[in-house]
Amino acid sequence: MYQEILNEIYNEVNSLDCLGKQADYIPELAKISSDKFAINLTELSGNNYGVGDITDKFSLQSIAKVFAFTLAYRLKGSAVFQHVGVEPSGDPFNSLIQLEQEQGMPRNPLINAGALAICDVLIDELADPEHDLFDFIKKIARNDAVTYNSKVYRSEKNTGFRNRALVNLMKSFGRINNDTEAVLDLYFKLCSVEMTAPELSKTFLVYANHGKIPETQEQILTNSQTKRLNAIMQTCGFYDEAGEFTFRVGLPGKSGVGGGIAAIHPGKYAVAVWSPMLNPKGNSVKGMKALELLTTKLGWSIF
């Protein structure tokens, strides 16, 4: 059933005249072929279904913020919310105005300021922040080969002026404990993590499985923590287009400006889509349409 539906969606979306623009403010991302398109769905049972460019790795960008927040939440529990809020931003993901108005307290952990604050928390909590964070990502991915793309990392580091402004603004309000360049370095490496669509959907199964790794049932987050993280993805996972995604798709998820989207149906599956052409809000045009068609054709959402 799933494979047939994915094939239908792939063909239907690929036939549409989907206008969009790649994230050329990160020069390395602008080099990706604009016609790349992949859809992959993994059931909790491990059954996997995919179509399109599913062997290509792509930059996760903001999707990887979910992993950093998962580790920080695991380490600090509810105390993590002393560093970030849980409200949708309603503003662009890199807004300085909102951060200034709210005394350097990020609205949520899935916008740039929030993820920078979470990286600061991880530097406080971990003996070797980069090594320990990537070990954690490998653990939930069940894939020791997961790493970041060094070219994308350098591209972001060389052009990340607004992220430097965000972290320094938070520092001025006393919200950042560590050296801002160390925070930025961890953040840029996090955003440069790359996976294929099947690797990403497999990784996101932990959020569809009450915080447990499916194969071993090892508890990464408690049931309550997973419920709350999924709620944050539902309300905050698509920048200032989270309401539109909830309305059209009805699944918790997270997008990234590399063109990827990961979403889950709790108790059923995780799905990853990738197409680099973005709408003005920074979300994949084909990815958004593909997931809307998926929940429409299946007749399932969380609502």
Image: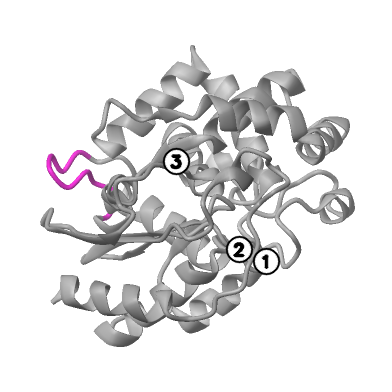
In the image as oriented, which residue stretches furthest toward the top?
Answer: 127
Callout 2: helix, strand or loop?
A: loop
Q: Is residue 113 magenta?
A: no
Res 169 → quadrant: top right
Residue marked by disc 3: 67
Q: How is the image coloured?
A: one colour
Front-most of residues 108 and 196: 196
Amino acid under disc 1: Lys
- 288 in relation to 295, above or below: above
Res 116 → quadrant: top right
Q: Is residue 211 magenta?
A: yes
Say whether residue 250 is visible: no
Amino acid under disc 2: Leu
Q: Which residues are magenta?
A: 210-218
Instruction: For the residues labelled 2 and 1, say whether their Cβ atoms are less than 8 Å apart.
Output: yes
Which of the two discs, 3 and 2, sits closer to the camera? 2
Percent x, y of residue 277 = 57, 62
Amino acid under disc 3: Phe
Instruction: State the CA–CA distance, disc 1 to disc 3.
Output: 22 Å
**Image quadrant for the C terminus?**
bottom left
- 267 in relation to 219, above or below: below
Q: Overall secondary structure of the magenta stretch?
A: loop
Identify the residue shown where x is 54% and y is 64%.
284
Instruction: State the CA–CA distance, disc 2 to disc 1.
Output: 8 Å
- Count the numbered circles shown: 3
Residue marked by disc 2: 278
Which of the two discs, 1 and 3, sits closer to the camera? 1
Residue marked by disc 1: 281
Percent x, y of residue 6 = 26, 72
